[in-house]
Image (cartoon, helix red, strand yellow):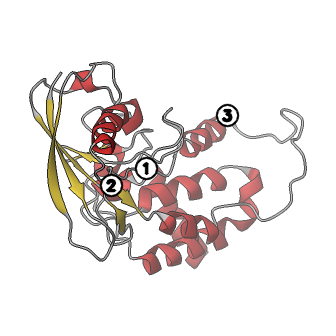
Amino acid sequence: MNFTIKIWRQSDRNSRGKFVEYKTVDISPDMSFLEMLDAINRDLAKKNEDVVAFDHDCREGICGSCGLYINGRAHGPQRGVTTCELRMRHFVDGTTIIVEPWRSKAFPVIKDLVVDRTAFERLIQAGGYISVDTGGAPDASSIPVPKANAEEAMDAAACIGCGACVAACKNSSAMLFMSAKVSQLALLPQGDPERRLRVQQMVRQMDKEGFGLCSNTYACETECPKKISVAHIARMNREFIRAKFF
């Protein structure tokens, strides 16, 4: 397969970026999108040119590092798939593919396709954890949890923090990411003692980081590679109201 790849190149957060066009030939349909970028970088390295910077780690769809905007979609055209899992056979041979970094005030570009996502880490530090020492792993079923709660908490815990929800939202809202953390801990007995403090602190930090409010378009749910439901945003809103007034 042959493609024309237009990639956003930007040397640092203070420089002006631009799209640069690259031609790829003999790309295997079974290559992942990141492997295709690897092929471009091998060609650039052979010519002693600056390679394209992009984030990647596990390449198994669980680390959340590989977020890219591909043809106007977070993680590309396949739903429920991260960029590292996206295969080149899902693109039409001979077409042009446009690759951009996440675009959000809270995610400034570091270089090329790499953005600074430490805002997410500061959200977690604001309360997305349990502060008590729970000791070693308890015996199975020693802490009763209703099955429905356990399943919803597990669904929320599937969030990998890639930032696709922010990138897909026209308001750059982080509410899907944050609500997944709030919801997961609010549903489990271990997180119950701090649930009121947690949601207030995380909402305060979200505003401080410059994330926008929920746009109610469901774009975050559509583009989330782990299919996190916007129902968690509704739960987070209820948790916030409960914490403020009850």
Question: Residue shown at 45%/50% (left/top)?
Answer: 162
Q: Which residue is mark 2?
A: 113
Q: Secondary structure at mark 3?
A: helix
Q: Earlier in the sequence, mark 1 or mark 2?
A: 1
Q: Position of residue 19 (x, y in %)?
A: 15, 56
Q: Which residue is mark 3?
A: 147
Tell me the mark number nearer the camera, choosing from 3 and 2: 2
Dot 2: within a 10 Å radius of its alpha carbon, few (fewer than 14), some, or many (20 or more) residues? many
Numbered badge on residue 149: none
Q: Secondary structure at mark 2?
A: loop
Q: Going by the image, does 133 lie left or right of 6? A: right
Q: Position of residue 74 (x, y in %)?
A: 30, 46
Dot 3: within a 10 Å radius of its alpha carbon, few (fewer than 14), some, or many (20 or more) residues? few
Q: Position of residue 63 (x, y in %)?
A: 53, 43
Front residue of 27 and 80: 27
Amino acid at dot 2: Leu
Q: Earlier in the sequence, mark 3 or mark 1?
A: 1
Q: Which residue is mark 1?
A: 55
Residues at discs 3 and 1 in contact (Cβ within 8 Å): no
Question: Residue shown at 34%/66% (left/top)?
Answer: 109
Question: How many marks overall?
Answer: 3
Cα separation, mark 3 vs mark 1, equals 37 Å
